[in-house]
Image: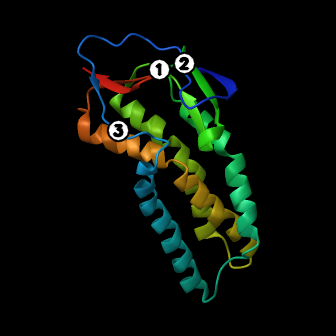
């Protein structure tokens, strides 16, 4: 397992140890992951959560959850943000160091490691934290009618867990459009690069 190092609060432009890129490495053109450009990537996950809510309400014949429990789910979702970053971190090579922390100016968290990854491993690393939304959404859908408190917590937790990876969805989308499947992807302090 890689070494995951908590580095606390950092500025947006904080730099971390990086490796030399090989000759001919090409940049992956992506908007800033902390910008509004990531917002459209949340539309499908949000729609999925509302479809699940309407489906559950239709099946039960009533609104399925206790509204006050939504706030508990949101709070739990916020508390799980470091777990989201650790899930990114466990996907890196065994000898890697992954730096995890917070960027207060952007109200964001980060997991940074500049080790090269295969195309497939990059996609898995980027999308692994979605399990923090998928699992509560499944619990919400499978919960019996009497579990209205649990459903309230799980639905809002699912929303948080599926929306927090918006920058990751955007990065995967950029890589899928620009990078051949057999390529290696390496992040640097100035962005993502790929090479064969």
The image shows residue 125 at horizontal and vertical percentages of 47, 35
Which residue is at 66% across, 70% downward? 143
Q: Tell whether label 2 touches label 1 (CB within 8 Å).
A: yes
Kindly tell me whether residue 76 is visible in this rendering: yes
In the rendered image of this protein, does residue 91 appear above or below residue 61?
Answer: above
> Is the residue under label 3 in contact with that under label 2 (CB below 8 Å)?
no
Camera-nearest label, 1 or 3: 3
Q: Secondary structure at mark 2?
A: loop
Q: Which residue is mark 2?
A: 16
The quadrant of the rendering that contains the N terminus is top right
Left or right: 93 as drawn, with respect to 1: left
Q: Residues within 10 Å of mark 3 (few under 14, many from 20)?
A: some
Q: Residues within 10 Å of mark 1 (few under 14, many from 20)?
A: many
Residue at 33% across / 25% down in the picture? 193
For label 1, the residue is 114
Q: Is residue 113 left or right of residue 24?
A: right
Q: Is residue 64 above or below residue 123?
A: below
CA distance separating discs 2 and 3? 19 Å
Q: How many marks?
A: 3
């Amino acid at each position: 397992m890689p070494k995951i190092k908590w580095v606390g609060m950092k500025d947006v432009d904080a730099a971390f140890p990086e490796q030399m890129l090989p000759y001919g490495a090409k940049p992956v053109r992506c908007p800033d992951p902390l910008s509004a450009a990531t917002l459209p990537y949340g539309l499908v996950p949000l729609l999925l959560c509302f479809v699940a809510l309407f489906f559950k309400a239709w099946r039960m014949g009533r609104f399925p959850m206790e509204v006050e429990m939504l706030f508990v789910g949101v709070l739990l979702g916020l508390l799980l943000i470091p777990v989201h970053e650790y899930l990114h971190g466990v996907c890196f090579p065994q000898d890697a160091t992954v730096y995890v922390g917070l960027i207060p100016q952007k109200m964001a968290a980060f997991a940074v490691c500049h080790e090269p990854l295969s195309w497939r491993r990059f996609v898995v690393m980027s999308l692994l934290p979605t399990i923090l939304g998928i699992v509560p959404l499944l619990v919400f859908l499978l919960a019996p009618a009497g579990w209205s408190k649990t459903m309230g917590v799980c639905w809002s937790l699912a929303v948080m867990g599926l929306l927090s990876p918006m920058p990751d969805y955007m990065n995967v989308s950029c890589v899928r459009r620009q990078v051949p499947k057999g390529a290696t992807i390496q992040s640097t302090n100035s962005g993502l690069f790929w090479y064969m």
